[in-house]
Image (cartoon, rainbow, N blue to C red):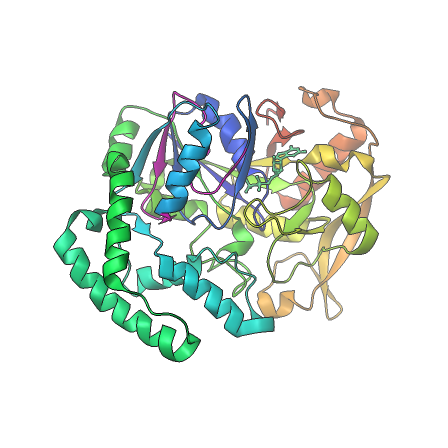
Amino acid sequence: MVKAIVGANWGDEGKGKITDTLAAQADIVVRFQGGANAGHTIINKYGKFALHTLPSGVFYDHVTSVIGNGVALNIPVFLKELKSITDRNVPMPEILISDRAQMVMPYHIRFDEYEEERLGGRSFGSTKSGIAPFYSDKYAKIGFQVNELFDEETLKDKLVRVCETKNVLLEHLYHKPLIDPEELFAEMMEWKKGVEPFVADTSAFLYNALQEGKEVLLEGQLGSMKDPDHGIYPMVTSSSTLAGYGAVGAGVPPYEIKKIVTVSKAYSSAVGAGAFVSEIFGDEAEELRRRGGDGGEYGATTGRPRRVGWYDAVASRYGCRIQGTTDVAFTVLDVLGYLDEIPVCVAYDIDGEITTEFPTTGRLEKAKPVFEKLPGWKCDIRGIKKYEDLPEKCRNYIEFIEEKIGFPITMVSNGPGRDDIIYREK
Ligand code: GDP
Protein backbone atom coordinates (compact mmCIF):
# COMPACT_ATOMS: atom_id res chain seq x y z
CA MET A 1 0.00 0.00 0.00
CA VAL A 2 1.21 3.50 -0.77
CA LYS A 3 0.51 6.54 1.40
CA ALA A 4 1.44 9.99 0.17
CA ILE A 5 2.36 12.73 2.64
CA VAL A 6 1.98 16.09 1.00
CA GLY A 7 1.41 19.75 1.87
CA ALA A 8 -1.87 21.67 1.62
CA ASN A 9 -0.27 25.08 1.58
CA TRP A 10 3.03 26.81 0.82
CA GLY A 11 5.33 24.20 2.33
CA ASP A 12 6.81 23.98 5.84
CA GLU A 13 3.59 22.46 7.10
CA GLY A 14 5.52 19.82 9.07
CA LYS A 15 5.58 17.03 6.47
CA GLY A 16 9.03 15.90 7.65
CA LYS A 17 7.76 15.35 11.17
CA ILE A 18 4.62 13.52 9.98
CA THR A 19 6.70 11.34 7.64
CA ASP A 20 9.13 10.57 10.44
CA THR A 21 6.19 9.64 12.70
CA LEU A 22 4.41 7.48 10.11
CA ALA A 23 7.67 5.87 8.96
CA ALA A 24 7.68 3.91 12.22
CA GLN A 25 5.17 1.60 10.50
CA ALA A 26 6.49 1.84 6.95
CA ASP A 27 9.03 -0.18 4.99
CA ILE A 28 10.03 2.37 2.38
CA VAL A 29 10.05 6.19 2.20
CA VAL A 30 10.34 7.80 -1.23
CA ARG A 31 11.09 11.37 -2.25
CA PHE A 32 9.40 11.92 -5.61
CA GLN A 33 9.93 15.56 -6.61
CA GLY A 34 11.83 18.72 -5.83
CA GLY A 35 15.39 19.04 -4.72
CA ALA A 36 17.52 20.60 -2.06
CA ASN A 37 15.55 23.85 -2.26
CA ALA A 38 13.42 23.16 0.81
CA GLY A 39 14.12 21.46 4.07
CA HIS A 40 12.38 19.16 6.45
CA THR A 41 13.10 19.57 10.11
CA ILE A 42 13.11 16.39 12.11
CA ILE A 43 13.66 15.94 15.81
CA ASN A 44 14.29 12.45 17.18
CA LYS A 45 16.53 10.54 19.55
CA TYR A 46 19.64 11.43 17.52
CA GLY A 47 19.01 15.16 17.70
CA LYS A 48 17.60 17.85 15.42
CA PHE A 49 18.19 17.59 11.69
CA ALA A 50 17.35 19.69 8.66
CA LEU A 51 17.14 17.36 5.68
CA HIS A 52 17.11 18.74 2.15
CA THR A 53 17.67 15.72 -0.05
CA LEU A 54 17.47 12.60 2.08
CA PRO A 55 14.02 11.09 2.59
CA SER A 56 12.71 11.47 6.16
CA GLY A 57 12.93 7.70 6.75
CA VAL A 58 16.72 7.68 7.10
CA PHE A 59 16.56 7.62 10.89
CA TYR A 60 14.99 4.16 11.05
CA ASP A 61 17.00 1.04 10.37
CA HIS A 62 13.92 -0.87 9.16
CA VAL A 63 13.24 1.71 6.41
CA THR A 64 14.67 1.80 2.90
CA SER A 65 14.91 5.38 1.64
CA VAL A 66 14.41 5.97 -2.05
CA ILE A 67 15.30 9.02 -4.12
CA GLY A 68 12.86 8.72 -6.99
CA ASN A 69 13.26 9.59 -10.64
CA GLY A 70 11.26 12.82 -10.19
CA VAL A 71 13.79 14.35 -7.80
CA ALA A 72 16.34 17.02 -8.70
CA LEU A 73 19.37 15.25 -7.27
CA ASN A 74 22.24 17.42 -6.14
CA ILE A 75 24.93 14.79 -5.58
CA PRO A 76 27.41 16.89 -3.53
CA VAL A 77 24.55 17.95 -1.23
CA PHE A 78 23.36 14.34 -0.98
CA LEU A 79 26.82 13.06 -0.01
CA LYS A 80 27.35 15.86 2.47
CA GLU A 81 23.98 15.30 4.08
CA LEU A 82 24.57 11.57 4.37
CA LYS A 83 27.90 12.22 6.05
CA SER A 84 26.37 14.80 8.36
CA ILE A 85 23.87 12.31 9.76
CA THR A 86 26.28 9.38 10.07
CA ASP A 87 28.77 11.74 11.76
CA ARG A 88 26.07 12.29 14.39
CA ASN A 89 25.73 8.56 15.12
CA VAL A 90 22.74 7.81 12.91
CA PRO A 91 23.39 4.28 11.56
CA MET A 92 24.16 4.21 7.81
CA PRO A 93 20.71 4.11 6.22
CA GLU A 94 19.68 1.84 3.37
CA ILE A 95 19.34 4.23 0.40
CA LEU A 96 18.47 3.69 -3.23
CA ILE A 97 18.80 6.37 -5.89
CA SER A 98 16.81 5.98 -9.09
CA ASP A 99 19.04 5.44 -12.11
CA ARG A 100 16.62 7.75 -13.93
CA ALA A 101 16.84 10.62 -11.43
CA GLN A 102 18.41 13.66 -13.04
CA MET A 103 21.31 15.54 -11.55
CA VAL A 104 21.48 19.19 -10.60
CA MET A 105 24.53 20.53 -12.42
CA PRO A 106 26.75 23.28 -10.96
CA TYR A 107 25.64 25.56 -13.81
CA HIS A 108 21.97 25.14 -12.81
CA ILE A 109 22.82 26.74 -9.50
CA ARG A 110 24.79 29.50 -11.20
CA PHE A 111 21.98 30.21 -13.69
CA ASP A 112 19.48 30.37 -10.84
CA GLU A 113 21.60 33.02 -9.09
CA TYR A 114 22.31 35.00 -12.25
CA GLU A 115 18.68 35.04 -13.33
CA GLU A 116 17.45 36.23 -9.92
CA GLU A 117 20.14 38.93 -10.05
CA ARG A 118 19.08 39.93 -13.56
CA LEU A 119 15.41 40.11 -12.57
CA GLY A 120 16.23 42.32 -9.59
CA GLY A 121 13.01 43.48 -7.93
CA ARG A 122 10.94 41.17 -10.15
CA SER A 123 12.70 38.03 -8.96
CA PHE A 124 10.90 34.87 -7.77
CA GLY A 125 12.55 34.71 -4.38
CA SER A 126 14.29 31.51 -5.46
CA THR A 127 16.40 29.62 -2.93
CA LYS A 128 19.03 29.55 -5.70
CA SER A 129 19.40 25.80 -5.54
CA GLY A 130 19.19 25.50 -9.32
CA ILE A 131 15.73 23.98 -9.34
CA ALA A 132 14.08 26.07 -12.08
CA PRO A 133 17.04 25.76 -14.52
CA PHE A 134 17.22 22.05 -13.68
CA TYR A 135 13.59 21.29 -14.54
CA SER A 136 13.74 23.57 -17.60
CA ASP A 137 16.63 21.48 -18.90
CA LYS A 138 14.89 18.23 -18.00
CA TYR A 139 11.90 19.11 -20.16
CA ALA A 140 14.08 20.67 -22.85
CA LYS A 141 15.70 17.22 -22.94
CA ILE A 142 19.21 18.40 -22.16
CA GLY A 143 19.30 17.11 -18.58
CA PHE A 144 21.55 14.34 -17.29
CA GLN A 145 20.20 11.16 -15.70
CA VAL A 146 22.26 9.38 -13.05
CA ASN A 147 22.76 6.35 -15.32
CA GLU A 148 24.64 8.59 -17.78
CA LEU A 149 27.53 8.77 -15.31
CA PHE A 150 28.26 5.17 -16.23
CA ASP A 151 28.71 5.73 -19.96
CA GLU A 152 31.74 7.98 -19.95
CA GLU A 153 32.30 8.52 -23.68
CA THR A 154 28.68 9.45 -24.39
CA LEU A 155 28.65 11.68 -21.32
CA LYS A 156 31.75 13.56 -22.48
CA ASP A 157 30.23 14.29 -25.90
CA LYS A 158 26.93 15.39 -24.46
CA LEU A 159 28.64 17.69 -21.98
CA VAL A 160 30.47 19.44 -24.81
CA ARG A 161 27.19 19.91 -26.70
CA VAL A 162 25.19 21.18 -23.73
CA CYS A 163 27.95 23.48 -22.49
CA GLU A 164 28.09 25.16 -25.89
CA THR A 165 24.59 26.58 -25.49
CA LYS A 166 25.07 27.34 -21.80
CA ASN A 167 28.25 29.25 -22.58
CA VAL A 168 26.47 31.48 -25.10
CA LEU A 169 24.11 32.60 -22.34
CA LEU A 170 26.92 32.98 -19.82
CA GLU A 171 28.92 35.13 -22.18
CA HIS A 172 26.26 37.28 -23.79
CA LEU A 173 23.36 37.44 -21.36
CA TYR A 174 24.97 37.20 -17.94
CA HIS A 175 28.60 38.20 -18.68
CA LYS A 176 29.97 35.53 -16.37
CA PRO A 177 32.78 32.95 -16.52
CA LEU A 178 32.24 30.09 -18.98
CA ILE A 179 31.95 26.37 -18.21
CA ASP A 180 34.79 24.04 -19.09
CA PRO A 181 33.20 20.70 -20.05
CA GLU A 182 36.35 18.76 -19.21
CA GLU A 183 36.49 20.11 -15.69
CA LEU A 184 32.83 19.35 -15.29
CA PHE A 185 33.38 15.80 -16.52
CA ALA A 186 36.12 15.29 -13.94
CA GLU A 187 33.82 16.58 -11.21
CA MET A 188 31.07 14.23 -12.34
CA MET A 189 33.41 11.27 -12.15
CA GLU A 190 33.86 12.12 -8.46
CA TRP A 191 30.07 12.15 -8.09
CA LYS A 192 29.96 8.77 -9.76
CA LYS A 193 32.24 7.26 -7.11
CA GLY A 194 30.06 8.72 -4.37
CA VAL A 195 26.69 7.50 -5.64
CA GLU A 196 27.63 4.21 -7.26
CA PRO A 197 26.68 2.08 -4.22
CA PHE A 198 23.15 3.51 -4.18
CA VAL A 199 22.06 3.56 -7.82
CA ALA A 200 19.24 1.16 -8.70
CA ASP A 201 16.15 0.61 -10.82
CA THR A 202 13.90 1.96 -8.10
CA SER A 203 10.58 1.61 -9.92
CA ALA A 204 11.26 -2.15 -10.26
CA PHE A 205 12.25 -2.24 -6.59
CA LEU A 206 9.03 -0.49 -5.58
CA TYR A 207 6.91 -2.67 -7.83
CA ASN A 208 8.30 -5.81 -6.24
CA ALA A 209 7.97 -4.36 -2.76
CA LEU A 210 4.30 -3.59 -3.38
CA GLN A 211 3.73 -7.12 -4.68
CA GLU A 212 5.12 -8.35 -1.37
CA GLY A 213 2.68 -6.16 0.54
CA LYS A 214 5.23 -3.63 1.77
CA GLU A 215 4.13 -0.23 3.04
CA VAL A 216 5.49 2.71 1.07
CA LEU A 217 5.38 6.39 2.01
CA LEU A 218 5.73 9.06 -0.65
CA GLU A 219 7.14 12.21 0.85
CA GLY A 220 6.20 15.44 -0.86
CA GLN A 221 8.09 18.69 -0.73
CA LEU A 222 6.45 22.13 -0.51
CA GLY A 223 2.66 22.17 -0.92
CA SER A 224 -0.35 22.65 -3.20
CA MET A 225 0.14 26.42 -3.54
CA LYS A 226 3.57 25.79 -5.08
CA ASP A 227 2.39 23.33 -7.71
CA PRO A 228 3.21 24.62 -11.22
CA ASP A 229 -0.28 23.77 -12.52
CA HIS A 230 -2.61 24.26 -9.60
CA GLY A 231 -0.66 26.70 -7.44
CA ILE A 232 -0.07 30.44 -7.47
CA TYR A 233 1.71 30.48 -10.83
CA PRO A 234 4.29 31.86 -11.51
CA MET A 235 5.32 32.04 -7.85
CA VAL A 236 5.50 28.27 -7.73
CA THR A 237 8.17 25.62 -7.77
CA SER A 238 9.20 23.79 -10.92
CA SER A 239 7.99 20.26 -10.18
CA SER A 240 4.55 19.09 -9.19
CA THR A 241 3.96 19.03 -5.45
CA LEU A 242 0.82 16.91 -5.73
CA ALA A 243 0.24 13.36 -4.54
CA GLY A 244 -0.87 12.46 -8.07
CA TYR A 245 2.60 13.24 -9.33
CA GLY A 246 3.91 10.80 -6.74
CA ALA A 247 2.99 7.98 -9.10
CA VAL A 248 5.19 9.50 -11.81
CA GLY A 249 8.03 10.79 -9.69
CA ALA A 250 8.40 7.54 -7.76
CA GLY A 251 7.39 5.23 -10.58
CA VAL A 252 4.52 3.45 -8.80
CA PRO A 253 1.07 2.59 -10.19
CA PRO A 254 -1.35 5.47 -9.46
CA TYR A 255 -3.99 3.05 -8.14
CA GLU A 256 -1.62 1.93 -5.39
CA ILE A 257 -1.84 5.34 -3.67
CA LYS A 258 -4.61 4.53 -1.22
CA LYS A 259 -4.11 7.23 1.37
CA ILE A 260 -3.25 10.86 0.85
CA VAL A 261 -2.27 12.51 4.09
CA THR A 262 -2.31 16.24 3.50
CA VAL A 263 -0.41 18.22 6.09
CA SER A 264 -1.76 21.62 7.03
CA LYS A 265 -0.37 23.88 9.72
CA ALA A 266 -2.64 25.51 12.32
CA TYR A 267 -1.58 28.95 11.04
CA SER A 268 0.06 29.98 7.76
CA SER A 269 3.64 30.58 6.71
CA ALA A 270 5.33 31.04 3.38
CA VAL A 271 8.78 31.72 2.03
CA GLY A 272 9.48 33.58 -1.16
CA ALA A 273 7.28 35.95 -3.09
CA GLY A 274 3.65 35.54 -4.13
CA ALA A 275 0.12 36.35 -2.96
CA PHE A 276 -0.52 35.43 0.67
CA VAL A 277 -3.99 36.63 1.58
CA SER A 278 -4.04 35.97 5.32
CA GLU A 279 -0.55 37.37 5.91
CA ILE A 280 0.00 39.48 9.02
CA PHE A 281 2.62 42.10 9.75
CA GLY A 282 4.24 44.08 12.56
CA ASP A 283 4.40 42.97 16.19
CA GLU A 284 1.60 40.45 15.80
CA ALA A 285 3.56 38.72 13.01
CA GLU A 286 6.85 38.96 14.84
CA GLU A 287 5.40 37.21 17.86
CA LEU A 288 3.91 34.35 15.80
CA ARG A 289 7.16 34.00 13.84
CA ARG A 290 9.22 33.84 17.00
CA ARG A 291 6.95 31.28 18.66
CA GLY A 292 6.23 29.33 15.48
CA GLY A 293 7.42 25.88 14.38
CA ASP A 294 10.18 24.69 16.62
CA GLY A 295 12.50 27.59 17.33
CA GLY A 296 10.74 30.10 15.08
CA GLU A 297 9.59 30.36 11.50
CA TYR A 298 12.89 30.68 9.69
CA GLY A 299 13.61 28.75 6.48
CA ALA A 300 15.30 25.35 6.98
CA THR A 301 17.38 25.89 3.81
CA THR A 302 18.02 29.61 3.79
CA GLY A 303 17.44 30.79 7.36
CA ARG A 304 15.20 33.51 5.90
CA PRO A 305 12.38 34.73 8.15
CA ARG A 306 9.17 33.16 6.86
CA ARG A 307 6.14 35.27 6.12
CA VAL A 308 3.39 34.35 8.56
CA GLY A 309 -0.37 34.72 8.77
CA TRP A 310 -3.55 33.23 10.20
CA TYR A 311 -5.00 29.97 8.97
CA ASP A 312 -6.38 30.34 5.46
CA ALA A 313 -9.34 27.99 5.14
CA VAL A 314 -9.98 29.05 1.52
CA ALA A 315 -6.48 28.16 0.35
CA SER A 316 -6.41 25.00 2.50
CA ARG A 317 -9.75 23.70 1.29
CA TYR A 318 -8.53 24.10 -2.28
CA GLY A 319 -5.08 22.77 -1.37
CA CYS A 320 -6.61 19.64 0.19
CA ARG A 321 -9.00 19.12 -2.72
CA ILE A 322 -6.30 19.34 -5.36
CA GLN A 323 -4.18 16.82 -3.45
CA GLY A 324 -7.04 14.30 -3.33
CA THR A 325 -6.89 14.26 0.46
CA THR A 326 -8.13 11.26 2.44
CA ASP A 327 -6.72 12.49 5.78
CA VAL A 328 -5.57 15.84 7.08
CA ALA A 329 -2.69 16.05 9.55
CA PHE A 330 -3.17 19.33 11.42
CA THR A 331 0.17 20.47 12.77
CA VAL A 332 1.94 22.94 15.05
CA LEU A 333 -1.27 23.55 16.97
CA ASP A 334 0.62 23.90 20.27
CA VAL A 335 2.13 27.17 19.08
CA LEU A 336 -1.24 28.97 19.17
CA GLY A 337 -1.70 28.44 22.93
CA TYR A 338 -0.65 32.04 23.71
CA LEU A 339 -3.51 33.76 21.90
CA ASP A 340 -6.70 35.18 23.47
CA GLU A 341 -8.48 34.86 20.20
CA ILE A 342 -7.43 33.32 16.90
CA PRO A 343 -8.52 34.74 13.57
CA VAL A 344 -9.22 32.28 10.74
CA CYS A 345 -9.55 33.41 7.14
CA VAL A 346 -12.90 31.92 6.08
CA ALA A 347 -13.47 33.73 2.77
CA TYR A 348 -11.89 36.18 0.34
CA ASP A 349 -13.25 39.56 -0.57
CA ILE A 350 -12.35 40.21 -4.21
CA ASP A 351 -13.53 43.64 -5.35
CA GLY A 352 -16.48 43.42 -2.99
CA GLU A 353 -17.44 39.88 -3.95
CA ILE A 354 -17.18 37.36 -1.11
CA THR A 355 -15.99 33.94 -2.18
CA THR A 356 -14.72 30.70 -0.67
CA GLU A 357 -13.38 29.44 -4.00
CA PHE A 358 -9.64 29.80 -4.47
CA PRO A 359 -9.09 32.05 -7.50
CA THR A 360 -6.42 32.22 -10.21
CA THR A 361 -3.40 34.40 -9.52
CA GLY A 362 -4.59 37.76 -10.89
CA ARG A 363 -7.71 37.70 -8.75
CA LEU A 364 -5.85 36.21 -5.80
CA GLU A 365 -3.62 39.25 -5.71
CA LYS A 366 -6.67 41.44 -5.19
CA ALA A 367 -8.18 39.24 -2.48
CA LYS A 368 -8.63 40.59 1.04
CA PRO A 369 -9.12 38.15 3.91
CA VAL A 370 -12.46 37.79 5.67
CA PHE A 371 -11.60 36.74 9.20
CA GLU A 372 -13.71 35.03 11.82
CA LYS A 373 -12.30 35.01 15.34
CA LEU A 374 -12.32 31.97 17.58
CA PRO A 375 -11.55 31.98 21.29
CA GLY A 376 -8.04 30.80 22.21
CA TRP A 377 -7.45 28.03 24.78
CA LYS A 378 -4.63 29.84 26.56
CA CYS A 379 -2.62 26.85 27.72
CA ASP A 380 0.12 24.47 26.69
CA ILE A 381 -1.26 21.41 24.92
CA ARG A 382 2.07 19.63 24.41
CA GLY A 383 2.18 16.16 25.88
CA ILE A 384 -1.55 15.50 25.45
CA LYS A 385 -2.09 12.12 23.78
CA LYS A 386 -5.87 11.84 23.50
CA TYR A 387 -8.16 14.04 21.48
CA GLU A 388 -10.74 14.23 24.30
CA ASP A 389 -8.05 15.58 26.61
CA LEU A 390 -7.50 18.69 24.50
CA PRO A 391 -9.18 21.83 25.88
CA GLU A 392 -12.66 22.32 24.50
CA LYS A 393 -11.75 25.60 22.81
CA CYS A 394 -8.86 23.87 21.09
CA ARG A 395 -11.14 21.09 19.83
CA ASN A 396 -13.55 23.77 18.66
CA TYR A 397 -10.77 25.39 16.66
CA ILE A 398 -9.87 22.06 15.03
CA GLU A 399 -13.49 21.18 14.28
CA PHE A 400 -14.26 24.65 12.94
CA ILE A 401 -11.39 24.35 10.49
CA GLU A 402 -12.30 20.79 9.59
CA GLU A 403 -15.77 21.94 8.66
CA LYS A 404 -14.43 24.87 6.61
CA ILE A 405 -11.96 22.77 4.64
CA GLY A 406 -14.29 19.80 4.22
CA PHE A 407 -11.71 17.04 4.80
CA PRO A 408 -11.28 14.93 7.94
CA ILE A 409 -8.55 15.92 10.37
CA THR A 410 -7.41 12.50 11.59
CA MET A 411 -4.09 13.53 13.10
CA VAL A 412 -3.22 16.49 15.28
CA SER A 413 0.40 17.33 15.90
CA ASN A 414 1.04 19.11 19.19
CA GLY A 415 4.82 19.29 19.26
CA PRO A 416 7.83 18.78 16.99
CA GLY A 417 8.80 15.31 18.29
CA ARG A 418 7.99 11.96 16.73
CA ASP A 419 5.52 11.06 19.46
CA ASP A 420 3.76 14.42 19.67
CA ILE A 421 0.78 13.17 17.73
CA ILE A 422 -2.89 12.66 18.52
CA TYR A 423 -4.73 10.19 16.29
CA ARG A 424 -8.39 10.83 15.90
CA GLU A 425 -10.68 8.06 14.71
CA LYS A 426 -13.14 9.32 12.11
P1 GDP B 1 8.17 20.52 6.12
O1 GDP B 1 9.01 21.09 5.05
O2 GDP B 1 6.73 20.44 5.74
O3 GDP B 1 8.69 19.22 6.64
O4 GDP B 1 8.20 21.52 7.35
P2 GDP B 1 9.46 22.10 8.13
O5 GDP B 1 10.16 20.98 8.78
O6 GDP B 1 10.25 23.02 7.31
O7 GDP B 1 8.75 23.04 9.18
C1 GDP B 1 7.99 22.62 10.20
C2 GDP B 1 8.61 23.11 11.51
O8 GDP B 1 7.69 22.88 12.52
C3 GDP B 1 9.84 22.35 11.93
O9 GDP B 1 10.67 23.22 12.66
C4 GDP B 1 9.30 21.24 12.81
O10 GDP B 1 10.21 20.77 13.79
C5 GDP B 1 8.18 21.95 13.47
N1 GDP B 1 7.04 21.15 13.82
C6 GDP B 1 6.42 20.15 13.13
N2 GDP B 1 5.30 19.77 13.77
C7 GDP B 1 5.21 20.55 14.89
C8 GDP B 1 4.26 20.67 15.93
O11 GDP B 1 3.24 19.99 15.97
N3 GDP B 1 4.52 21.62 16.88
C9 GDP B 1 5.61 22.42 16.87
N4 GDP B 1 5.78 23.31 17.82
N5 GDP B 1 6.51 22.35 15.88
C10 GDP B 1 6.31 21.43 14.91
User: Residue 241, percent across and down?
Assistant: 46, 50
Image quadrant where residue 407 sits: top right
Give the vertical position of 314 relative to 234 (above or below). above
User: Residue 31, percent across and down?
Assistant: 40, 40
User: Residue 180, percent across and down?
Assistant: 28, 64
Please say whether residue 301 is visible from this viewpoint: yes
Q: Residue at position x 72%, y 55% from top? A: 278
Give the vertical position of 366 relative to 317 (above or below). below
Please say whether residue 3 is visible from this viewpoint: no
**Image-quarter location of ligand 1:** top right
Magenta highlight on residue 72: yes
Magenta highlight on residue 335: no
Number of numbered discs visible in the structure rendering: 0
User: Residue 372, percent across and down?
Assistant: 80, 49
Magenta span: 49-74
Q: Is residue 268 left or right of residue 375?
A: left
Q: Is residue 289 left or right of residue 60?
A: right
For the view shown, which residue lies furthest in the bottom direction? 172
Q: Residue at position x 33%, y 47% from top? A: 248
For the view shown, which residue lies furthest in the right direction? 340
Query: The C terminus lies in which quarter of the figure?
Result: top right
Image quadrant where residue 340 sits: top right
Towards the viewer: 367 or 24:
24
**Majority SS type along the magenta span:** loop
Image quadrant where residue 140 sits: bottom left
Q: Is residue 229 left or right of residue 185?
A: right
Q: Residue at position x 18%, y 56% from top? A: 155
